[in-house]
């Protein structure tokens, strides 16, 4: 490793490494957790449960080094092997040695790396489990972190370092040979480039280093152009993989800045756009929402790291998390937490995501593309959080293995959306590929006086013998309740099943809907033709983890175009709900055309008018309770008329 290289930990002398150790010790709880994880691995207990572990495990596997079968998964999921072969846990062990200088950590690092290098030569077989390009890119970053520590606190013999560096050179050539424009839409290539670019800076004296560095930046810019939407979202419809790409991008920029390398302006612009997108979708409590193939993660440290790279401040106000501290390395990094936004309203127009959040509520509505293998069948899905309590939740991912329910967790009936005739609106051939994907249309997001209107539809059921067009309207009110109205446009009979996955194990049927006893919430159906049932099901907050919840299923047989409307609200907030007749030109309108709903609260009333389709007489002013209103989506509050659309 070049002596002038400034790496991830920002430690260029023994003194700065010693100071970095003291800075880490200012996080006693986090250090104890790091030491606990490290001791487990050293003892032969393998459990991948660190922050931002891509595929976490929740059950320990006990293996001594001589027993490890590098290409055989102990839990019948190859993701276990990929986690093992990325070597992120070795960085914990290296830091554990920095903190304690206990020889057991140092010995384990040497023994594990020796065993890995001996048993994992690059060949056609190992390409399936230890030499996948994504894992190679991640692994070399972790090796470079270990060698960065080693420069000023001996971990390895000179001979062992020489062997590691020979392997790093092979890793770099392998990554370089696999760069291509065709692979630019995959998150893999960005993670691989982070590894290749890091090597090119750590070993600038190597003959090919300049070519690696030049190619890294060229293919990085091309890859970002192919996978980052204009609205800043990574194309794969997963917050987790958006953040994984962002993290790799930040690492590249950080190393470039520290080593006086120029980063092309478009690459920095992509980092800023992706950071701002993450600031829009992070929940008010700092958590990453479970959406697509995503886990529930704390985004605080990631967004602090992003702030320090793309929008540094000159005033130190906030303390970095342990994750951010490890990412920044030694030194002071002023933070304002400017990207941990708790109030925003944003429509990702390319991604088809609509999000409104306040410190009190978080609303996510999806009407966008599938996005690829990490996307789910979640068109018209709604997630909702109120007062820091998750009310309506997403299924998560659990596993990428079809035999472990991969397709069931992706399916529409695992989301808060609508299913027609018990059929999926997408058709998948395996865990990653599809042969039919629904087209989302009619996306809208509009706001007025902190009232937010969302709308979307899709053509996923247009291949039925009697095509069905689905359209959902959602109005969220600042008092903390939602009005949900679903329209089904067709000619013949169909079965409509609408799913609501509650973060609750205590859901009771009532005459007008469902009560969530432990969340003190209720779902009220305004459609008398709906039959409501409650079933136990499971969701997956993180990979390999399940959680039991209740799912409300509202079933209805329709005979031609129809509409169903629901209210999701805190119990006791709404005293009375009335559906009022609506007239146009003195003709009473069908509720499938336009409906009016009046809410009575303790001290006020609100009227909502929703137009679902054009009246046969053409659009006119609507008369409700002898007052006239003109618009498609209207709210009347305190005699103030608000036209949202």
Image: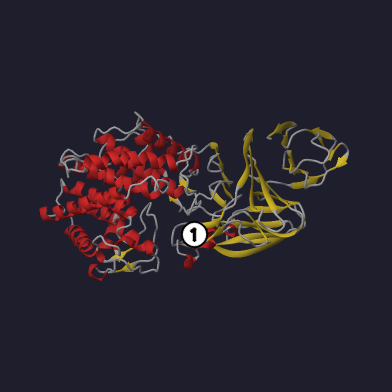
Residue 597 picture location, percent across and down: 76, 44
x and y percent of residue 295 in the render? 45, 53
Question: Which residue ends up furthest to the bottom in the rendered image?
Answer: 67
Near-viewer residue (47 or 322): 47
Task: Identify the residue at image location x=83%, y=34%.
Answer: 627
At 22% from the left and 42% from the top, the residue drawn is: 209
Please state, as top left, top right, bottom left or bottom right, where the N terminus lies in the image. top left
Number of marks in the rendered image: 1
Q: In the rendered image, is residue 320 in sight? A: no
Q: Is residue 246 visible?
A: yes
Left/right of residue 523 with respect to residue 42 in the rendered view: right
- Residue 424 vs 206, above or below: the answer is below
Q: Which residue lies furthest to the right in this view?
A: 586
Report whether 593 appears left or right of 263. Answer: right
Provide residue 271's location: percent of width, then percent of height. Answer: 39, 37
The C terminus, quarter of image? top right
Determine whether the residue tagged by mark 1 lies in a helix, strand or loop: loop
Say if 340 sits above or below 138 in the image.
above
Pointer 1: what residue? 540
Q: Which of 575 and 83 is in front in this view?
A: 83
Residue 201 placement, left or right of 378: left
Of residues 422 and 32, which is closer to you in this image?
A: 422
Q: Where is residue 292 in the image (x, y as percent from the top left)?
A: 50, 52
Check the image and name the residue furthest to the left: 158
Q: How is the image coloured?
A: secondary structure
- Within 10 Å of disc 1 (Cα), the crowding (few <14, some 14-19, many 20+) is many
Taking the spot 31% from the left edge, 43% from the top edge, the residue there is 327
Vertical placement of residue 513 versus 615, above or below: below
């Amino acid at each position: 490793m070049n002596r002038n290289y400034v790496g991830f930990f920002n430690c260029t002398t023994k003194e700065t490494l010693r100071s970095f150790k003291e800075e880490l010790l200012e996080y006693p709880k986090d250090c104890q957790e790091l030491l606990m994880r490290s001791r487990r691995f050293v003892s032969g207990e393998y459990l991948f449960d660190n922050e931002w572990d891509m595929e976490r495990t929740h059950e320990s596997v006990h293996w001594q080094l001589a027993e490890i079968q590098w290409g055989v998964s102990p839990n019948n999921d190859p993701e276990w092997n990929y986690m093992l072969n990325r070597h992120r846990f070795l960085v914990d062990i290296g830091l554990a040695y920095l903190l304690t200088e206990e020889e057991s950590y140092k010995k384990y690092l040497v023994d594990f790396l020796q065993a890995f290098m001996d048993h994992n030569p690059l060949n056609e077989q190992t390409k399936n489990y230890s030499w996948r390009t994504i894992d190679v890119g991640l692994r070399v970053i972790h090796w470079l972190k270990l060698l960065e520590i080693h420069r000023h606190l001996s971990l390895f013999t000179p001979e062992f370092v020489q062997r590691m560096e020979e392997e790093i050179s092979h890793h770099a050539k392998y990554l370089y040979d696999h760069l291509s424009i065709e692979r630019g839409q995959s998150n893999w290539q960005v993670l691989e480039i982070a590894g290749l670019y890091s090597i090119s800076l750590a070993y600038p004296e190597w003959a090919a280093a300049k070519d690696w560095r030049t190619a890294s930046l060229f293919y990085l810019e091309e890859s970002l152009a192919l996978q980052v939407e204009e609205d800043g979202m990574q194309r794969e419809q997963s917050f987790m993989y958006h953040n994984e790409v962002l993290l790799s991008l930040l690492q590249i920029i950080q190393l470039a800045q520290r080593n006086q390398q120029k980063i092309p302006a478009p690459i920095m612009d992509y980092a800023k756009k992706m950071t701002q997108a993450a600031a829009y979708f992070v929940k008010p409590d700092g958590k990453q929402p479970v959406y697509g193939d995503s886990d529930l993660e704390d985004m605080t440290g990631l967004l602090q790291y992003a702030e320090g790279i793309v929008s540094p401040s000159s005033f130190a106000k906030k303390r970095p998390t342990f994750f951010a501290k490890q990412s920044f390395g030694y030194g002071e990094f002023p933070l304002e937490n400017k990207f941990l936004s708790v109030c925003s309203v944003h429509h990702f127009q390319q991604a088809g995501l609509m999000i409104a959040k306040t410190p009190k509520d978080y609303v996510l509505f999806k009407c966008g593309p599938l996005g690829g293998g990490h996307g789910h069948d979640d068109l018209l899905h709604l997630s909702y959080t109120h007062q820091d309590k998750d009310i309506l939740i997403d299924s998560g991912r659990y596993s990428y293995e079809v035999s472990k329910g991969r397709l069931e967790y992706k399916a529409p009936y695992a989301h808060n959306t609508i299913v027609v005739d018990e059929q999926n609106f997408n058709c998948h051939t395996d865990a990653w590929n599809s042969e039919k994907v629904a087209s989302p249309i009619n996306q809208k997001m509009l706001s007025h006086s902190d009232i937010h209107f969302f709308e979307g539809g899709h053509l996923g059921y247009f291949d039925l013998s009697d095509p069905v067009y689905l359209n959902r309207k959602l109005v969220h009110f600042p008092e903390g309740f939602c009005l949900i109205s679903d329209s089904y446009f067709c000619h013949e009979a169909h079965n409509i099943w609408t799913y609501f996955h509650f973060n609750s194990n205590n859901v009771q049927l009532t005459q007008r809907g469902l009560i969530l006893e432990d969340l003190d919430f209720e779902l009220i159906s305004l459609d008398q033709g709906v039959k409501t049932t409650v079933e136990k099901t499971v969701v997956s907050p993180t990979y390999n983890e399940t959680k039991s919840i209740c799912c409300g299923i509202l079933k209805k047989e329709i005979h031609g175009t129809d509409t169903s409307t629901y209210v999701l609200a805190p119990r006791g907030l709404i005293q009375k709900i009335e559906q009022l007749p609506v007239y146009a030109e003195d003709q009473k309108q069908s509720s499938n055309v336009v409906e009016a709903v009046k809410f009575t609260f303790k001290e006020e009333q609100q009227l909502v008018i929703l137009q679902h389709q054009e009246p046969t007489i053409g659009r006119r002013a609507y008369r409700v309770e002898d007052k006239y209103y003109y618009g498609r989506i209207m709210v009347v509050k305190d005699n103030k008329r608000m036209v949202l659309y």
